[in-house]
Image (cartoon, helix red, strand yellow):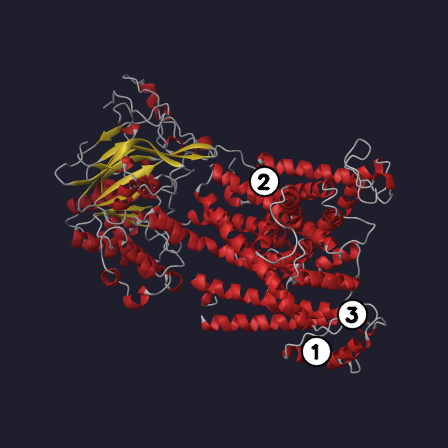
């Protein structure tokens, strides 16, 4: 019994009209179409390929990355290429506004702000990246060991971490700075003394969760060595989140450096950092507001870029968003 | 529609097309689905994950988030009123009191920060002017009815203090408390163990008997269907591919997909060393559904025509219909009954043959042979 | 609930004890002998020796210090001769607390409001506005915000005073400067959490019960979404508190933060020690309150595990 009317699909789908007479040839059995039946019409990508593909499509994150790269390049080369030194004073140009000679103007002792800005960027970015990186790595290793091996080590570490977590970290950082004195190295040390706690807690939780997943249990039953399990099953699964967390921690570290320098505990003058520039600029708020405005611009856009990159990474690594555009 | 019209139609879906906007484009989750639900019947919807059965159930109450979900066309008539055109207030009146919904996962379907009694009572919030005591009394009454022991105490507990089975009972109490005419169950027993499942199915049957409630049972478990339902819809790729009474679906299977489902479960006739045969492959991508029959790519009986044109719905008996090109007069005849069914028939045939031929033979003999045959 | 609170209190006390110990020995690690500086006023010196027991071994000094703390005695300032740290904290902390509380109230009220509004209007202009505001807000350190507000509203427009802290008008700029960053991060957290909760199954359950959108948002969505905001309350309080260090000196607020920063620059060791312990205790106390609040809001926390 052949159907004469064609089925109308109201969803806008084009549905072929079934002709009145069907060729008997059409009714030869062809069976399963093995090529098509497993067809998932999207290309299959590895985790990292997929993450990178989605990160590239995230415009704010991509712009943030370009801006950050530009700042890093400027921090490296701008002071070298300028004819001014960041310490050279010029009494004639005190508090001068931006001009072709001094691109961003001069401070109250006539030092060129363009050069000082990028010298400051060197310190701020170095401290920010290093402190965040050390914290992330130390925390991840300790947290990973605790989470994976558990037992007495985990018990003791977690009690310590719980107590340290309750201690306000900035207070300790301030105190350590008072004890060890000012400088770039001491700043990084001070920021790392209890800075690793957060990443340790996070990694431990994640590793502990992954360790109890069935696929890890399956690997263990198959007799796979711990090292291989960690490398094959654990690390690839937390790497995305660790990278994201690292990226999110950098603005915090830059912020802390600026804060410490601002309250006079970070870098010792005449060295400079963005925090010191902000402090000097704020003192001159009434006479030469451009100083603080330029500093603010660079600090804020750096933070913004890092936040954007962090958000982009988080979305790119989010397994729930995998495969989406 | 050739479906029986003597009974009272309570819910009617006509050519419903429901889609979702996603990043990748429009997903056509429900593609031209029509069916009726009658007073006091239990209708099963069966199909594998992603076939659109849950979306169908949820769009009856407009529970899918809109946007991204939207109706492309079709009507859903509840007691003659089109649900698709209802405003927020009408929907509020429909939900809870007219149609109750039991969700799949009781672990996540209860608000963790609210006492379960309060959650049950909330159904009354907009419906009846009841006093607080009346509400509480009614809630506890329903909790007892669904088999929650010590209901007074449970009333004050939080979801995390209850076991999975208890939580599902709370969910059922929530669906029942407003005395709805229709209850939609979206795989209510999937996350529960078998004993609890049996109790819950028992409870649903009792409810139907007591209140003549209509129930839509969504599941991928054919066992649940066999135990509970009067009629069954088999869904695949967003379409209903076969429908009929439970007996029709189980014993007179008329669609290769249904056959595949049947063959993938074990029956009493399945021999110990026999392999179950799953349906090979994965369901079609609903971003761009195939233009012919959605099942063609995985169907062992597929013909050229299946990939070219969509099959029309063909009425086999008054209640039983299928959408498959094999029903076409030019198509080769295939036996679509499930393997167990065929085996049962062969067994029966042999038995009768033996009985006919071997009245002289020993009855013990034939029994031994039969056992060996299985 | 009672058991939960007791547990949290014990944890807080242990944390405080560790903090005091760390701080005490850190200060004693400082280069030179901080308490025998030659510039020291003889009266102060006498007080110091009595207070810290310099003539005794270190461990005895430590317990003597603990004993003093137990009596609520925080020691003497070396810079402000004859003033006890208690006196300085007592006269300056009210200003800091006032500023901090105002900022916290602004940040929470507006942060939650913006976060909720953004999530409810997901994808439209209001949401975009809130998201941009939040991202910008979290990119501006509070001392820069302070400088900016001072420049615009104080120096250029001359609408509001920028120094002193006497009446309401004086409190506006400092508390806004302090609140902005926190407000942005609260609204970010709240928005994300609201969007997370709205996808939960129990929201669908609530809809299936025929509840109004208002009730679903209020009773089911916000109540659950607020949890992550409570978890960041500890760090938030800490952020506001450290923010006062710079905002106070910028707006000449006679608060404790200014003294603390000054003491770190003047190497006023005894004051650093006393004030650090006070700040630490204060923050630990705030964290304790947050923990208890969390237990009140989330019934799952109360039973432990």
* Dot 1 and dot 3 within a common chain: yes
Horizontal side, residue A138 vs residue B61: left or right: right
Is disc 1 placed on a helix, strand or loop? helix
Question: Does residue A160 appear in the picture of this structure?
Answer: no
Disc 2, SS: helix
Disc number lying in front (3 or 2): 3
**Residue at 49% across / 51% down in the picture?**
C112
Number of other residues with Cα within 10 Å of mark 1, as a class: few under 14, some 14 to 19, many 20 or more = many
Quote the CA–CA distance across marks 1 and 3: 16 Å
Label 3: how many Cα within 10 Å (few below 14, some 14–19, many 20+): some
Q: What numbered label is drawn on residue A51?
A: 2
**Marks 3/2 same chain:** no
Determine the residue located farthest toward the left in the rendered image: B6
Give the residue number, with chain letter if any, for mark 1. Answer: C65
Which is in the foreground here, disc 1 or disc 3?
1
Residue holding disc 3 = C29
Whether residue A44 sits left or right of residue A116 in the image: it is left
Q: Position of residue A209 (x, y in %)?
A: 54, 57
Numbered mark located on residue B126 in the image: none
To which chain does the residue with label 1 belong? C
């Amino acid at each position: 019994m052949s159907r004469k009317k064609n089925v109308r699909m109201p969803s806008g789908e084009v549905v072929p009209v079934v002709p009145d007479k069907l060729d008997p040839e059409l009714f030869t059995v062809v069976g399963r179409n093995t090529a098509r039946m497993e067809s998932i019409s999207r290309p299959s990508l590895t985790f990292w390929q997929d993450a990178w593909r989605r990160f590239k499509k995230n415009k704010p994150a991509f712009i943030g990355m370009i801006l950050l790269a530009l700042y890093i390049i400027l921090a490296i080369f701008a002071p070298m290429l300028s004819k001014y030194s960041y310490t050279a004073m010029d009494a004639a140009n005190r508090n001068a506004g931006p001009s072709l000679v001094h691109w961003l103007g001069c401070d109250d002792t006539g030092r060129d702000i363009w050069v000082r800005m990028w010298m400051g960027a060197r310190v701020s970015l170095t401290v920010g990246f290093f402190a965040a990186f050390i914290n992330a790595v130390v925390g991840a290793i300790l947290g990973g060991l605790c989470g994976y091996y558990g037992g007495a080590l985990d018990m003791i570490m977690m009690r310590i971490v719980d107590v340290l977590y309750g201690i306000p970290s900035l207070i300790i950082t301030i105190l350590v700075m008072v004890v060890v004195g000012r400088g770039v190295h001491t700043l990084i040390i001070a920021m790392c003394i209890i800075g690793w706690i957060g990443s340790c807690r996070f990694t431990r939780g994640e590793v502990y969760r992954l360790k109890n997943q069935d696929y890890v249990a399956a690997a263990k039953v198959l007799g796979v060595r711990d090292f291989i399990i960690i490398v094959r099953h654990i690390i690839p699964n937390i790497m995305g989140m660790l990278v994201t967390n690292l990226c999110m921690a950098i603005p915090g570290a830059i912020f802390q450096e600026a804060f410490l320098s601002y309250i006079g505990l970070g870098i010792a003058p005449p060295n400079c950092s963005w925090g010191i520039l902000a402090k000097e600029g704020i003192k001159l708020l009434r006479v030469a507001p451009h100083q603080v405005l330029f500093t603010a611009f660079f600090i804020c856009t750096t933070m913004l870029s890092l936040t954007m990159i962090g958000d982009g990474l988080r979305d790119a690594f989010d397994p729930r968003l995998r495969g989406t555009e | 529609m050739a479906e029986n019209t003597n009974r009272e139609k309570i819910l009617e879906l006509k050519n419903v097309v429901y889609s979702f906007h996603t990043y990748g484009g429009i997903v056509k989750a429900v593609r031209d689905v029509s069916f009726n639900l009658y007073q006091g019947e239990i209708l099963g919807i069966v199909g594998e994950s992603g076939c659109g059965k849950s979306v169908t159930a949820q769009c009856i109450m407009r529970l899918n988030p809109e946007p991204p979900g939207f109706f492309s066309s079709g009507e859903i008539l509840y007691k003659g009123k089109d649900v698709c055109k209802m405003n927020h207030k009408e929907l509020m009146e429909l939900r809870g009191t007219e149609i109750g919904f039991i969700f799949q996962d009781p672990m996540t379907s209860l608000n963790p920060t609210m006492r379960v009694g309060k959650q049950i009572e909330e159904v009354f919030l907009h419906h009846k002017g009841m006093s607080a005591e009346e509400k509480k009394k009614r809630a506890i009454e329903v909790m007892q009815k669904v088999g929650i022991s010590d209901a007074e105490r449970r009333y004050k507990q939080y979801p995390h203090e209850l076991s999975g089975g208890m939580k599902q009972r709370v969910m059922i109490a929530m669906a029942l408390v407003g005395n709805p005419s229709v209850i939609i169950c979206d795989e209510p027993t999937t996350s529960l163990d078998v004993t609890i499942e049996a109790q819950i199915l028992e409870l649903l049957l009792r409810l139907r008997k007591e209140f003549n409630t209509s129930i839509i049972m969504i599941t991928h478990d054919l066992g649940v269907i066999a135990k509970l339902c009067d009629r069954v819809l088999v869904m695949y790729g967003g379409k209903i591919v076969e429908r009929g009474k439970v007996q029709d679906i189980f014993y007179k299977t008329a669609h290769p997909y249904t056959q595949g489902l049947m063959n993938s479960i074990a029956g009493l006739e399945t021999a110990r060393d026999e392999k179950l045969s799953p349906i090979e492959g994965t369901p079609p991508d609903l971003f761009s559904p195939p233009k012919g029959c959605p099942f063609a790519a995985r169907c062992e009986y597929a013909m050229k025509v299946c990939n070219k044109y969509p099959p029309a719905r063909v009425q086999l008996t008054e209640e039983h219909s299928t959408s498959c090109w094999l029903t076409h007069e030019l198509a080769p005849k295939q036996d679509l009954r499930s393997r167990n069914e065929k085996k049962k028939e062969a067994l029966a045939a042999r038995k009768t043959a033996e009985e006919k031929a071997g009245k002289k033979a020993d009855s013990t003999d034939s029994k031994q042979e039969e056992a060996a045959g299985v | 609930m009672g058991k939960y609170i007791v547990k949290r209190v014990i944890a807080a006390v242990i944390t405080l004890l560790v903090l005091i110990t760390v701080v005490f020995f850190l200060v004693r690690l400082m280069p030179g002998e901080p308490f025998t500086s030659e510039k020291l006023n003889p009266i102060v010196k006498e007080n110091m020796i009595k207070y810290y027991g310099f003539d005794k071994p270190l461990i005895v000094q430590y317990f003597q210090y603990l004993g003093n703390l137990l009596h609520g005695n925080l020691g003497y300032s070396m810079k402000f001769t004859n003033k006890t740290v208690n006196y300085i904290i007592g006269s300056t902390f009210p200003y800091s607390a006032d500023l901090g509380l105002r900022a916290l109230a602004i940040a929470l009220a507006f942060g939650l409001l913006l976060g909720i509004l953004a999530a409810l209007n997901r994808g439209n202009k209001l949401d975009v506005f809130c998201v941009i505001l939040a991202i910008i807000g979290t990119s501006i350190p509070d001392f820069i915000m302070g400088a900016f507000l001072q420049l615009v509203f104080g120096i250029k427009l001359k609408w509001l005073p920028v120094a002193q802290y006497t009446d309401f008008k004086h409190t506006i700029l400092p508390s806004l400067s302090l609140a902005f960053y926190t407000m942005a991060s609260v609204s970010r957290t709240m928005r994300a959490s609201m969007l997370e909760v709205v996808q939960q199954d129990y929201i669908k359950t609530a809809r299936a019960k025929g509840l109004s959108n208002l009730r679903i948002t209020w009773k089911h969505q916000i109540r659950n979404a607020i949890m992550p905001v409570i978890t960041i309350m500890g760090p938030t309080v800490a952020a506001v508190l450290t923010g006062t260090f710079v905002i106070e000196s910028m707006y000449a607020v006679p608060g404790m933060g200014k003294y603390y920063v000054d003491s770190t620059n003047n190497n006023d060791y005894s004051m650093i020690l006393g004030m650090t312990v006070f700040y630490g205790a204060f923050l630990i106390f705030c964290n304790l309150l947050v923990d208890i609040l969390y237990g009140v809001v989330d019934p799952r926390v109360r039973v432990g595990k």
